[in-house]
Amino acid sequence: MKLARIYPFVVAVGIMFALSACRGIVSNPSPHATQATDYAQAVHWLSIPVVSHDVDVFYLYPTAWQKVNASDPNICDIDNPSMLAGSAAAFARSATAFEPFANVYAPYYRQADAAYALSLPLPEHDALIAGIPTMDAVAAFDYYIEHFNAGRPFILAGHSQGSNVLINLLTGYLADHPEVYQRMVAAYVIGYPVTAELLA
């Protein structure tokens, strides 16, 4: 399935989040890297709303944590306190804008450290984000579709790293599930570039 028909609905701001100050970087594997987060557990959701609208928003927050020490894993655990606090703050700043007209669902997902990710050559950066962060987002979205969505139209919304992951969701899961894709109203992938090549 080509994604050309997404083009009128995708809002992309081609400004990538800034690389933080240089520091020693170690290619540390993330713990629990071989298995997606279990989204049947409510504790792994930032927002599960009471359904009161006819449309949903599936929201992925921007980078919400950073490594403290060079020896820290390059991808955080799902219960990382800094990530939990940062994602809640990001949700309050941005995702709440959708609440007057949509049911906003937001999973927690494991993220890459931005300084490490942006230090990598592009193919390695893309592979990093396509790994654990995207694996979690796909698992969360699939659980949302199967257990929460109930056939309603939906909007995808993200920022920075969340938008990067949403692009993978668009070109992977939604390309493979046209019956779900046809219910998508729009995809707001703010803070990450969407190229003509991607949409071809």
Image (cartoon, rainbow, N blue to C red):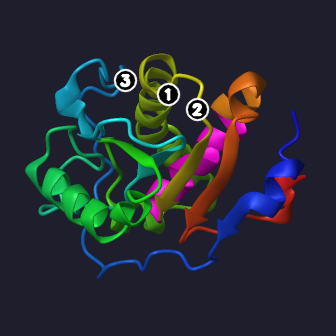
The mark that comes first in sequence, 1 or 3, is 3
Where is residue 3 drawn, in percent x and y?
83, 45
Q: For the residues marked 1 and 3, what is the alpha-carbon distance in whole angstroms?
A: 20 Å
Q: Amino acid at mark 2?
A: Arg
Q: For the residues marked 3 and 2, what is the alpha-carbon distance in whole angstroms?
A: 25 Å
**Which of the 4 image quarters holds residue 1?**
top right
Q: Amino acid at mark 1?
A: Asn
Q: Is residue 124 visible?
A: no
Does the segment drawn in magenta span residue 70? no
Relative horizontal placement of residue 113, taking residue 127 as reference (left or right): left
Where is residue 11 drawn, in percent x and y?
67, 68
What residue is rendered at 75% in x and 32% in y? 175
**Residue wearing tag 3:** 36
Report crowding for label 3: few under 14, some 14 to 19, many 20 or more residues within 10 A (C-alpha): some
What residue is rendered at 31% in x and 25% in y? 37
Q: Amino acid at mark 3?
A: Ala
| Label 2 SS | loop
What residue is rendered at 32% in x and 79% in y? 20
Between 161 and 73, which is closer to the camera in this rendering?
Answer: 161
Report crowding for label 2: few under 14, some 14 to 19, many 20 or more residues within 10 A (C-alpha): some
| Label 3 SS | loop
Span shown in magenta: 160-172
Between 130 and 104, which is closer to the camera in this rendering?
Answer: 104
**Which mark is on residue 152?**
2
Disc 2 to disc 1: CB gap under 8 Å: yes
The image shows residue 27, relative to residue 11, as above or below, that is: above
The rendered magenta stretch, by its main secondary structure, is classed as helix
In the image as oriented, which residue stretches furthest toward the left? Answer: 81
Where is residue 72 drawn, in percent x and y?
17, 51
**Residue wearing tag 1:** 149
Relative horizontal placement of residue 149, taking residue 19 as reference (left or right): right
Where is residue 41 drawn, in percent x and y?
22, 21
